[in-house]
Amino acid sequence: MLSVSRVALVALFVFLAACTKPAVWAPEADVQAARYAHAGPPSISLFTIVSNSSGNGDHAALMINASQRVLFDPAGSWRHPLSPERHDVHFGFTEAQLFRYTYYHARATHRVRIQHLNLPPETAELILTLAQRAGPVPDGHCARSIGVIFRQVPGLRHMPAAFHPNTLSNAFATISGVREEIVTSDAEPTEAQTYPG
């Protein structure tokens, strides 16, 4: 007969296993081949996928433009062969991939709130490093995982490590220098969706 402590330990192991997604770790050659350095200033862009019917934030992601531009899409469903993934970080996040990602989410049921913030190069690089260490992220922890990263960064330590994407995006909106855009679409995403140009 198992002791109470052993039962608790087994239950904890089962719980943690259920919360762990399969690791995705692209080969080094693929990551290096996809590497993309964007000409714009060092920056981050917070994506919040918002339900048009309820106004709830259903997902959060973070584009990071540092020594290379990547997308940290914690517990996200977006995949593309031109953006190899390692633990929720998608490399080779070009303008075409930015378009594909945005319109994968912008549809009749959802809009995309994108908030941009320019940063010193060393701050953007720190966020890139922290994002590469953060995953894989369990389902339902997208906004929290981004908030945890922010709380390790000078100037962003006051950001909430909240589970709700709207809580994070509303707090992010209060930072001086944040620029915002809303992307909407009446279309549904398709596998054939391509970048126009």
Image: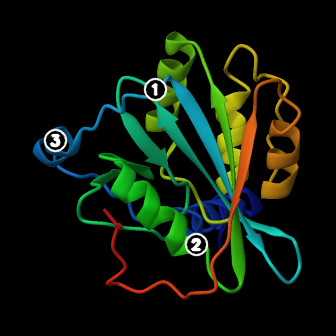
Give left or right: position of 103 versus 94: right
Crowd around label 1: few <14 · some 14–19 · many ≥20 (10 Å): few
Residue placed furthest toward the front: 197
Q: What kind of residue is marked 1? A: Thr
The residue pinned by badge 1 equals 129
Residue 28, numbered label: 3
Find the distance from the CA under tag 2 to the CA under tag 1: 26 Å
Place of residue 40 in the rendered image (x, y in percent of width and height, measured from the top left): 45, 28
Q: Which mark sits nearer the N-terminus, 1 or 3?
A: 3
Q: Residue at x 35, y 57 (%)?
A: 96
Crowd around label 3: few <14 · some 14–19 · many ≥20 (10 Å): few
- Asked if 147 appears above or below 124 in the picture, the reply is below
- Asked if 58 appears above or below 33 in the picture, the reply is below
Q: Residue at x 78, y 22 (%)?
A: 157
Residue 105, numbered label: 2
- Asked if 197 appears above or below 41 in the picture, the reply is below
